Image (cartoon, rainbow, N blue to C red):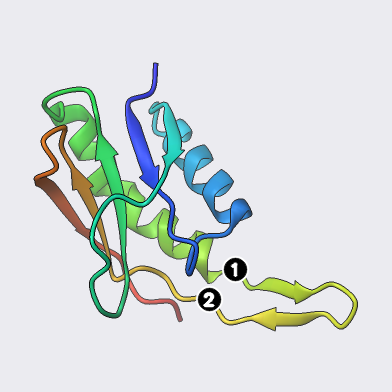
Amino acid sequence: MTQILVEENFEHIDGQDMEDIIAALAALGLTADPTQPRTAVRGRPWVMVLHWIQGELPPAVDEKLNSTLADTVRDIFGRPRAVDRATGSMRPRTAPRLVEVHGPTGAVIRTIGVPSIG
């Protein structure tokens, strides 16, 4: 059963990024799926949004998210991604400034700062 949803952001998260984020959450013991954008886009730098859908965020899950998610997200977005396979040109990548975890009511229940790349 899905525990957490990862909000799609077509400007910043491509299909490989989404797979990597879902795999990183799975490594923390969480079942995740993508979901359509549902929060208002705020300026820059961007914020990655997760939705905890299982009621209250258990302390053990909160600790896992707090201790490793920021570095994992930075690592995912720190890897260059080829834009054009023929020319090998690379797309600049921008890690989110924050990861917000929203609860079932939509309220922000955890904010995790992401270290900058480089």
- The relative height of residue 71 versus residue 82 in the rendered view (above or below) is above
Quadrant for the N terminus, please.
top left
Q: Nearer the viewer, mark 1 or mark 2?
A: 2
Residue at image position (52%, 70%) is 78
Q: Amino acid at mark 2?
A: Arg
> Exactly how many numbered labels are in the figure?
2
Whole-percent x and y of residue 106? 14, 42
Res. 70 mark: none
Badge 2: few (under 14), some or many (20 or more) residues near its Cα, within 10 Å?
Answer: some
Whole-percent x and y of residue 16? 62, 53
User: Cβ–Cβ below 8 Å for labels 1 and 2?
Assistant: yes
Kindly state the secondary structure of the residue where label 1 is placed: loop
* Residue at image mark 2: 93
Q: Is residue 81 left or right of residue 32?
A: right
Residue at image position (30%, 45%) is 50
- The relative height of residue 77 versus residue 37 in the rendered view (above or below) is below
Whole-percent x and y of residue 118? 46, 81
* Residue at image mark 1: 79
Residue at image position (13%, 30%) is 59
Whole-percent x and y of residue 61? 23, 31
